[in-house]
Image (cartoon, helix red, strand yellow):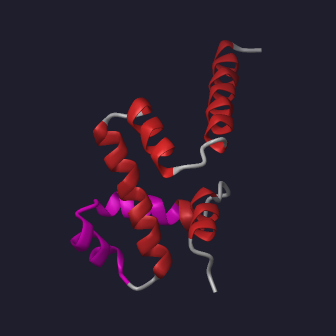
Amino acid sequence: MSPKQTLLNARAALADELAEALVHLKEKGDARALLADLCTPAEIHTLAERWHVAKLLDAGELTYREIHQATGVSTTTIVRVARFLRQENNGGYRLLLDSVAPRR
């Protein structure tokens, strides 16, 4: 195995460990505490902005430009969130959107 592949495998294993730990969070306060420990305030803000944009895009009531004007989030970030919401195979945004506020 190449050193690059070894590094990629190690990173994937660390991400899996973090994902497994996240599954055990039950309360909003616990999630906030973990975010405060793991991320800088700026990183938390960035994550929160992306989540907000995902909810706005999912609602389908605003254009990208209107979302930018309402939130101040860059159009590049809005396009990226939209791509991950609608095109990428990860499905993370969709999974969480559906679990928080199921679509009718």
Image location (x, y in percent) of residue 25: 60, 43
Q: Residue shown at 22%/72% (left/top)?
A: 69
Give the percent coordinates (x, y) of residue 87. 60, 65
Q: Is residue 102 left or right of residue 65?
A: right
Q: Main secondary structure of the magenta part?
A: helix
Number of dots carrying numbers: 0
The quarter of the picture where the C terminus appears is bottom right
Residue at 40% of width from left, 66% of height from top?
Answer: 53
Q: Is residue 58 above or below residue 97?
A: below
Residue at 55% from the left image edge and 60% from the top image edge: 84
**Residue 57 drawn in magenta:** no
Query: Is 92 on the left-hand or right-hand side of 70?
Result: right
**Relative to residue 40, is residue 74 depicted above or below?**
below
Query: Residue 71 location in percent, x, y?
Result: 26, 67
Q: Camera-side residue: 79 or 12?
A: 12
* Residue 41 in which image quadrant: top left
The residues colored magenta run 62-83
**In the shown orientation, is residue 28 left or right of residue 67?**
right
**Coordinates of residue 9 in the picture (x, y in percent):** 70, 24
* Residue occupying image coordinates x 44% and y 31%: 38
Q: Quadrant of residue 100?
A: bottom right
Query: Nearest the camera: 57 or 97?
Result: 97
Q: Is residue 4 above or below residue 89?
A: above
Q: Nearer the viewer, residue 52 or 100?
A: 100
